């Protein structure tokens, strides 16, 4: 599938990442379906998008009219059956079986023709594609990594990751789509943590060890790292990412 054929983008998971990704896709002019199993999470995701757009207006980066148009292009849904789309970007739990189940269902809903992009932080793309529930073998060629950073509506970098099965033209289409989103894509290899999280893990794990060893408390470590030029101390960053999401990513790095 080439870029011109992409009209509708579905985003699964309306949490920290999914809401922002849906906003980015809508801002790029796409028709967006934002899906979550939880109605409450979906409502929260909607509020997050509204708030982000209002801040953009306050900063003079957007008009009220543009905000209205962007919001009107996002539909909020709680059934997988509604996910008729050209590209699915999943941002659900960092659990292999949850992502595999979702891809199999969405592939079925779209007669196995939809690009299945995952925002996984660390699970190898080939493991997600190696999905016995996907009925059409060719669909595995449509599985690709599209790794955004938090917060997705502001952070420019996106790692585009090809697994063993990913068709090169699909990775290229996602690379182009990322550019259309106004982001900075980088092709990355399919290794746990890809590039950035592999480096970034040391920024999380070593401070935790320093804390455990009683060398310094969390506030002191954050203040020291910020004083050396890092924008955010490691403990503040772990809070931003989410302690549970961060733990899942760290586990994946060592276990997969
Ligand atoms: P989150 O917990 O904030 O949101 C996850 C959402 O997915 C929740 O709203 C939950 O209700 C929903 N969900 C769970 N199972 C579902 C299913 N089967 N179908 C539909 N919705 C489902 O998580 P997050 O921090 O946004 O992370 C999402 C993904 O993005 C993870 O794979 C994570 O590793 C990755 N990621 C996270 C960050 C980060 O900084 N938080 C950065 C990059 C990538």
Image: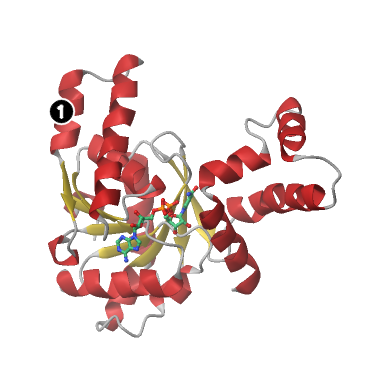
Above or below, comparing residue 149 to residue 85 in the picture: above
Residue at numbered disc 1: 68
Q: What residue do we see at 25% from left, 84% from top?
A: 135
- Is residue 25 visible to the viewer in this orientation of the structure? no
Q: Which is more toward the observer, 256 or 92?
A: 92
Quadrant where the N terminus is found in the figure: bottom left
Query: Is residue 73 shown left or right of residue 28?
Result: left
Q: Which is more toward the observer, 70 or 3?
A: 70
Q: What residue do we see at 61% from left, 38% from top?
A: 236
Above or below, comparing residue 14 to residue 179 in the picture: below
Quarter of the image where ligand 1 sits: bottom left
Query: Residue 85's x, y, as percent?
Result: 18, 59
How was this image coloured?
secondary structure
- Is residue 187 visible to the viewer in this orientation of the structure? yes
Query: Residue 110's x, y, as percent?
Result: 16, 69
Q: On the image, which quarter does residue 23 sit in?
A: top left
Q: Residues within 10 Å of mark 1 (few under 14, many from 20)?
A: few
């Amino acid at each position: 599938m080439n870029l011109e054929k992409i009209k509708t983008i579905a985003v699964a998971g309306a949490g920290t990442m999914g809401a922002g990704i849906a906003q980015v896709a809508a801002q790029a002019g796409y028709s967006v379906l934002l899906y979550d199993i939880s109605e409450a999470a979906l409502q929260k995701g909607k509020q997050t998008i509204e708030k982000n757009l209002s801040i953009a207006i306050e900063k003079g980066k957007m008009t009220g009219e543009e905000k209205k148009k962007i919001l009107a292009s996002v539909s909020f849904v709680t059934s997988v059956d509604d996910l008729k789309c050209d590209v699915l970007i999943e941002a659900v739990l960092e659990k292999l079986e949850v992502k595999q189940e979702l891809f199999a269902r969405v592939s079925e809903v779209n007669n196995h023709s939809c690009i299945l992009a995952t925002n996984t932080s660390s699970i190898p793309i080939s493991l997600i594609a190696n999905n016995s529930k996907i009925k059409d073998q060719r669909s595995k060629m449509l599985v690709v990594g599209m790794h955004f950073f938090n917060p997705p509506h502001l952070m420019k970098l996106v790692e585009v990751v090809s697994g063993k099965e990913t068709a090169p033209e699909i990775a290229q289409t996602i690379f182009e789509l990322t550019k259309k989103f106004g982001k900075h894509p980088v092709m990355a290899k399919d290794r746990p943590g890809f590039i950035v999280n592999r480096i970034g893990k040391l920024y999380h794990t070593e401070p935790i060890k320093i804390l455990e060893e009683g060398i310094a408390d969390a506030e002191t470590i954050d203040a020291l790292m910020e004083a050396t030029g890092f924008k955010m101390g490691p403990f503040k960053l772990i809070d931003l990412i989410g302690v549970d999401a961060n733990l899942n990513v760290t586990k994946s790095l060592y276990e997969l």
